[in-house]
Image: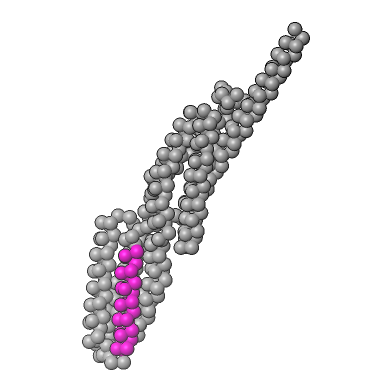
Amino acid sequence: MLLRAFLVAVFLASAIGCGREDVNATLQKVARAREVAADLTVKFTMASDAANRAVMADTDDASVAFAKESRESAAAVQTDVEQLRPMLEALGYTDEDSLLTAFATNFAEYRRLDDNVLGLAVENTNLKAQRLAFGPAQDAANDFREALKGLTPATPADSWHVAALAANAVMTVREIQVLQGPHIANADAAVMTRMEQQMSTSETAARKALDELRSLVAPASRTKLAAANEALKRFLDLNTQLIALSRRNTNVHSLMLSLDDKRTLTVACQGNLRALQTALSKRGYSGIRQR
C-alpha cells in the first residue's frame, strides 16, 4: 500500500510538472505573438507616415529618401506577417489567424497602390514645373521686359505706337505667366487645355508685337529688339517644358490617391491590426480567450 501510494504521488508530481512546463511554453508563445503583432502595428504606421512625407516633400532628395524609408518599413511589415502566421497556427488561434489573413489581403492591395503613389511622388513633376515658373521662366520674362524698355522710335510720330506695342508685348507674356500657376495645380485635362489655348493666343500676340516693332524702331534699338526676341524664345521654350511637366501631374495625382483610395486601405489595415491585438490580449494562461 505504501509503495502504491508513493508511486501515485510520483506520477502526480510528474504530471503536474509536465503541465507547468506546457503552460510556460504556451505563455512564451502567446507573449511572442503579442510582441510581433505590436511590432507589426508600429512598422505599418512607419510605412504609412513615411509614404505621406514622400508625397508632401518639397525636394527630390527628400521624396526619394522618404519613399525608400516607406518601402523598407513595408517590407518589415511583410516579414512580421510571415513570422506571426505560424505562431498563431501553432497556438491554434483560428480567429486571430483569420484577422491576420484579412490584414494581409488589405496590405497587399495597400502595397500595390503605395508603389504607384511613391513612384509618382518621386517624379515631382508639378514641383519641377513650379520651379521653372518662379525661376528660369520668371527671369526670361523679366529680361524680355527690360529689353523692350527705352526703345527709340524711327520717327517722333511713331513714339506712341512703339510704346503701346512694347507694353502690349510685355502684357501678353505676363498673361502666360499668370496661367502657369493654375495650370500646375490643376488636375483636369480639359481645363489645362483651355489654359494652353489662352497661352497660345498670348504667344501669338507677343510675336506679332515684336514683328511690328521691327519696322518702327531706329537702327540703334534693333539690338535691344533682338535681345527681346531671344528672351521671348527662351521664355516660350521654358513654358513648353513647364506644360509638359505639369501635364504629368505626378504630385497632384499622388496626393489625390493618398487622400482617397490609399486612405481607405490604410484605415482598413489599421482596423485589422487593432482587432488582432485586442484578440491576442484576451488570451489567458490556458490560451483560451477570456471574456
Q: Is residue 224 left or right of residue 290?
A: left
Is 287 part of what is drawn in magenta? no
Is residue 218 among what the camera can see? yes
Q: Is residue 111 left or right of residue 44?
A: left
- Which quadrant holds residue 220? bottom left
Residue at image coords 30%, 85%:
226
- Which quadrant holds residue 245? bottom left
Q: Position of residue 24 (x, y in %)?
A: 65, 29
Q: Position of residue 223 (x, y in %)?
A: 32, 88
Image quarter where the N terminus lies is top right
Q: Name the magenta segment's main secondary structure.
A: helix
Residue at image coords 51%, 47%:
76
Q: Position of residue 101 (x, y in %)?
A: 44, 35
Q: Residue furthest bottom?
A: 219
Q: How many marks?
A: 0
Image quarter where the C terminus lies is top right
Q: Residue furthest top?
A: 1
Residue at image coords 51%, 49%:
73
The answer to whether residue 251 is above or below residue 86 is: below
Is 242 part of what is drawn in magenta? yes
Q: Is residue 45 left or right of residue 232?
A: right
Is residue 161 among what the camera can see? no
Q: Is residue 185 left or right of residue 33?
A: left
Between residue 144 and residue 71, name the one nearer to us. 71
The answer to whether residue 260 is above or below residue 102 is: below
Look at the image and give the residue range highlighted in magenta.
221-245
Between residue 22 and residue 174, name the one nearer to us. 22
